[in-house]
């Protein structure tokens, strides 16, 4: 896995960090093998936050199980419930009202914005630049207000349900006006931040060439999402999702594969998300937001992949008498762990946490029993 | 008569130190409340919180037993640091100039080195739960380097403290020696008298350059961002101070504020020629300088990320070269 950078000689010093560390948003353990403060190898261990969500879902009524998936993650809660509901809808062959699909996309993109802003703020904090971190948090606050306005909560909105979205998440004219006004101010704020950020030469010297993941290695490690796109691979599942086929947006890529590319990647993706939301609002179809005329039937395991802020999210389960069977959930961070370990190699230990953070880890969602099948 | 003079001097020193101590408790709060918080558009803590209220709170907290091979020495080190800073401030008062062998640049540099060595010892004598000891064995995955020696983040900060001693504090000491190069004397009394006759060094070319270098050295010694390599949140967290709790943490907090003031007073003596003396209006200059330094430091730290070796080395080399230039200009 680490064949390009891996040193073969004996490494004398190990510096473990965690499971609790202020540079990490979540509990995880990382062991850095260092020589003169330069990381030669890193090993990430998760497992202290295992909740057994899939096991709990087993045998639950599908509506309850869908609500439970929202608890997997505090940052991309909407993505989990969306994909879980989408899995059921694929199995039950339900076509949802177009207005509901648009509202799901608005929520999904707002969630992408708040997740990317959290990423940027956390990245700046790990860099030691609290001022930039605070400024991004202020931008994020406007997005959190919008999510609260539409979903009724700052997190765990409970927006998607089988057949559409909850009627309370429907958008009326006053909500649309507030949404557009807030997006305008967020866009201006983000432009200002991006200008300041890229023109700060000290900051650039800290992030250029740090946490390098070459494109070849990223593909080999099955990296997904913005972390993959930051290495120059134009792969975004939204281009293949039928929900997004009416929307015009660009797949943002960067060439560097380092911390700078990853940070800029999120900034540029945030602009694209704003663009998508504007399109969704402008072309928001009229009509109902939910179709309750579906019927429960049994179905074989269904596989659903969607593009969430961190990459590809996979949900799969079968339905039997309206209950979940054989639930499998794979979060993007699961596939990105290899890249996180790889990214640290060759950097100063102060940059090591930054190299992990650049891959936007969400270990609490990832913390599940894993069976590795060797082929 | 001499008895009364001695008593007067002792009283002056005590009152000066008390006043300086009171002002010093406000400095961390001023930096955080009126600089960091204002720049970051947030309310910030009460101005008395970081410098005095937090130490009072910590003082009455329950203590923890540090995981240290020499716990008593580990616990004594903050007290040593505080005493060192106190002695430096006493040396700076004009009453101490009566004993020239003590009131000299060499004594101040030596005491500052003791302060720096304390950081090395603090890191070397502590092994917190943040890295070394886990409640469960965490060798489960079996990395490629199973036989590697397990180090810990305080140890890392200790090694960095050694690096600071070996090269990081060069700028500060070069700046301190610039007045020596100009006056040709290591005694504080001579430096002060020279400036009272010829005007402050700050307004000369070499003095101005040395003042800039002194400020950089001040930030490095105080371990403030961007030079906070001893306590970077991204890796070593609190570094040498990690396991200090209760009254020991309280002393750490108080010492930091006191060191901020003392270095400001040192600047006043070396570059303006005004020593801290409660019976002179000059003490206002000391207080103003002590206030300006944290404000400037807060502005710098709020707008820059933490440095790694890639940025730290060039800055230290550049500042050291400037310091050498200041000395050379001073000698000429």
Image (cartoon, coloured by chain):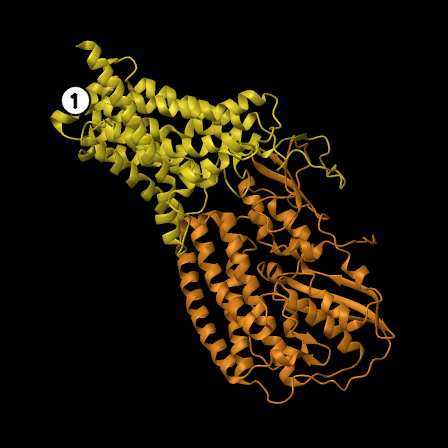
Chain colours: A orange, B yellow
Residue at left 17%, top 10%?
B1
Q: Quadrant of residue A18?
A: top right
Residue lying farthest to the left in this orientation? B197
Residue placed farthest to the top in the image?
Answer: B2
| Closer to us: A69 or B282 | B282
Chain letter belonging to callout 1: B
Instruction: Quadrant for the C terminus of chain A, please.
Output: bottom right
The answer to whether residue A177 is left or right of residue A248 is: left
Residue B173 on image: x %, y % = 34, 26
- Residue A231's place in the image compared with A127, above or below, is below
Residue B65 picture quarter: top right
* Residue B82 image point, x, y percent: 41, 26
Nearer to me, A231 or B23: B23
Secondary structure of the residue carrying numbered label 1: helix
- Residue at the spot x=39%, y=22% of the render? B84
* The quarter of the displayed image where residue A336 is located: bottom right
Number of numbered markers: 1
Locate residue B305 relative to residue A76 in the image: left or right: left
Give the residue drawn at x 41%, y 37%: B52
Please name the residue shown 59% across and 87% down the image: A285
Query: Where in the figure is residue A243, as x and y percent of width and height?
Result: 65, 78
The residue at which mark 1 appears reads as B193
Residue A200 coordinates in the image, percent (x, y): 40, 53
Q: Is residue B58 visible?
A: yes
Q: Is residue A348 visible?
A: no
Q: Callout 1 environment at 10 Å: few (<14), some (14 to 19), or many (20+)?
A: some
């Amino acid at each position: 896995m680490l064949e390009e950078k891996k040193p073969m000689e004996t490494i004398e010093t190990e510096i473990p960090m965690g499971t609790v560390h202020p540079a990490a948003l979540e509990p995880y353990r990382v062991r850095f093998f260092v020589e003169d403060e330069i990381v030669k190898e890193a090993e990430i261990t998760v497992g202290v936050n295992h909740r057994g969500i899939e096991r709990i879902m087993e045998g639950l009524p599908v509506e309850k199980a869908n609500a439970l998936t929202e608890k997997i993650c505090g940052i991309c809660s909407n993505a989990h419930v969306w994909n879980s509901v989408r899995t059921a809808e694929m199995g039950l062959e339900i076509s949802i009202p177009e207005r509901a699909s648009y509202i799901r996309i608005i929520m999904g993109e707002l969630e992408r914005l708040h997740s990317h802003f959290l990423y940027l703020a956390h990245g700046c904090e790990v860099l030691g630049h609290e001022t930039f971190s605070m400024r991004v948090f202020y931008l994020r606050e406007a997005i959190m207000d919008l999510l609260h306005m539409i979903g009724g909560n700052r997190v765990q909105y409970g927006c998607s349900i089988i057949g559409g979205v909850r009627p309370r998440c429907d958008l009326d004219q006053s909500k649309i006006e507030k949404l557009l006004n807030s997006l305008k101010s967020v866009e201006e704020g983000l432009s200002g931040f991006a200008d300041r950020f890229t023109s700060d030469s000290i900051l650039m010297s800290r992030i250029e060439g740090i946490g390098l993941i070459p494109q070849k290695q990223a593909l080999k490690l099955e990296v997904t999402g913005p972390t993959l796109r930051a290495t120059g691979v134009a792969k975004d599942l939204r281009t293949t999702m039928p929900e997004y086929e009416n929307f015009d947006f660009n797949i943002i890529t960067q060439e560097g594969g380092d911390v700078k590319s990853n940070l800029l990647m999120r900034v540029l993706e945030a602009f694209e998300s704003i663009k998508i939301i504007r399109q969704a609002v402008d072309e928001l179809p009229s009509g109902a937001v939910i179709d309750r005329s579906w019927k429960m039937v049994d179905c074989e395991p269904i596989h659903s992949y969607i593009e969430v802020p961190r990459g590809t999210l996979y949900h799969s389960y079968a339905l039997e008498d309206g209950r979940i069977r054989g639930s499998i959930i794979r979060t993007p961070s699961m596939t990105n762990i290899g890249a996180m370990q790889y990214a640290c190699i060759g950097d100063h230990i102060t940059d090591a946490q930054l190299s992990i953070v650049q891959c936007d880890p969400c270990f609490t969602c990832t913390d599940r029993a894993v069976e590795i099948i060797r082929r | 008569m001499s008895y009364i003079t001695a008593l007067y001097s002792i009283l002056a020193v005590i009152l000066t130190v008390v006043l300086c101590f009171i002002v010093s408790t406000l400095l961390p709060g001023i930096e955080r409340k009126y600089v960091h918080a204002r720049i970051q558009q947030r309310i910030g803590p009460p101005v008395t919180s970081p410098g005095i209220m937090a130490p009072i709170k910590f003082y009455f907290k329950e203590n923890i037993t540090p995981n240290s091979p020499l716990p008593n020495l580990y616990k004594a080190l903050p007290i040593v640091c505080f005493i060192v800073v106190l002695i430096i401030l006493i040396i700076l008062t004009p009453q101490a100039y009566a004993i020239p062998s003590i009131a000299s640049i060499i004594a101040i540099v030596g005491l500052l080195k003791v302060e720096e060595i304390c950081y090395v010892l603090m890191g070397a004598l502590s092994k917190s739960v943040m890295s070394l000891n886990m409640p469960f064995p965490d060798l489960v995955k079996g990395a490629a380097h199973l036989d590697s020696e397990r180090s810990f983040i305080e140890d890392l900060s200790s090694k960095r403290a050694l690096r600071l001693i070996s090269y990081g504090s060069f700028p500060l000491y070069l700046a301190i020696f610039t007045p020596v190069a100009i006056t040709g004397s290591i005694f504080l009394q001579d430096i002060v008298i020279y400036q009272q006759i010829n005007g402050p060094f700050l307004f000369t070319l070499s003095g101005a350059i040395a003042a800039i270098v002194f400020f950089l050295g001040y930030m490095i010694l105080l371990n403030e961002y961007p030079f906070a390599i001893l306590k970077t949140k991204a890796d070593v967290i609190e570094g040498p101070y990690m396991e200090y709790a209760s009254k020991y943490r309280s002393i750490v907090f108080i010492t930091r504020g006191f060191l901020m003031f003392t270095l400001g007073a040192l600047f006043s003596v070396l570059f303006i020629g005004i020593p801290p003396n409660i019976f002179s209006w000059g003490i206002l200059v000391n207080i103003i300088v002590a206030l300006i330094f944290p404000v400037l430091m807060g502005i710098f730290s709020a707008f820059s990320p933490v440095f790694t070796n890639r940025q730290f080395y060039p800055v230290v080399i550049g500042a050291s070269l400037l310091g050498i230039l200041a000395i050379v200009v001073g000698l000429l």
